């Protein structure tokens, strides 16, 4: 199995876990005299099995990421951490940009006036650069994922 396929399976299992939790929430408590629409014990067993399966898959994905060389001196795990750093910085700067861009109307001379302490255009340029870096790195990661075999043991 390719790493990319394992990542798709991981997402499917995460969605299944969320759905099982929702289904369980609907049947763990019923009105006296009613019967639940599904057996909660069956759902609990399926939830337990799916969480266990997800855990095993995540271990394989993490091992593969740790042992796969992405580029000289960097593993796939290193590059994933770098991609996450880029996204976190981009998100933080974008939130700052939003705060700096809020327009406050002044209705009289006695109201407090605000001014920006940063250059919005420079901050926007940095956000755009980070977005581009993220997209380019993410594309390379996705491309690599389809060439790597999942480490099964």
Image (cartoon, helix red, strand yellow):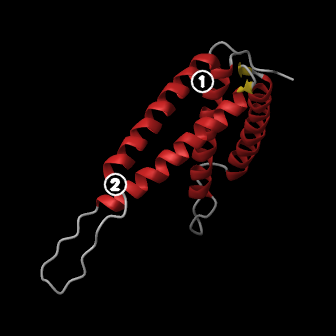
The single residue placed furthest to the bottom in the displayed view is 110
Residue 73 placement, left or right of 38: right
Residue 9 placement, left or right of 49: left
The single residue placed furthest to the top in the displayed view is 147
Depth-wise, is mark 1 or mark 2 nearer the camera? Answer: 2
> Counting residues from the N terminus, which is met first, the one under dot 1 or under dot 2?
2
Residue 64 placement, left or right of 29: right
Looking at the rendered structure, the secondary structure element under dot 2 is: loop
- Residue placed at 57% from the left, 62% from the top? 34
- Residue placed at 58% from the left, 64% from the top? 30
Locate residue 14, reporting x and y percent. 63, 40
Between residues 14 and 49, which one lies in front from this camera angle? 14
> On the image, numbered disc 1 is attached to which residue?
141
Tell me if residue 13 can be seen.
no
Between residues 12 and 6, which one lies in front from this camera angle? 6
Tell me if residue 62 can be seen.
yes
């Amino acid at each position: 199995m390719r790493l990319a396929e394992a990542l798709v399976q991981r997402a499917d299992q995460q969605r299944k876990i969320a759905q099982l939790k929702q289904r369980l929430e609907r049947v763990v408590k019923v009105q006296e005299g009613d019967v639940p629409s599904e057996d909660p014990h069956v759902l609990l067993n399926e939830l337990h099995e799916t969480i266990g399966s997800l855990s095993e898959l995540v271990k394989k994905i993490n091992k593969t990421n740790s042992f796969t060389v992405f580029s000289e001196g960097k593993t796939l795990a290193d590059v994933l951490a770098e991609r996450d750093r880029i996204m976190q910085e981009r998100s933080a700067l974008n939130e700052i940009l939003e705060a700096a861009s809020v327009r406050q109307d002044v209705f009289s001379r006695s109201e407090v006036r605000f001014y920006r302490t940063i250059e919005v255009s420079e901050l926007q340029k940095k956000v755009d650069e980070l977005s581009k870096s993220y997209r380019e790195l993410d594309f390379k990661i996705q491309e690599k994922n389809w060439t790597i075999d999942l480490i099964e043991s």
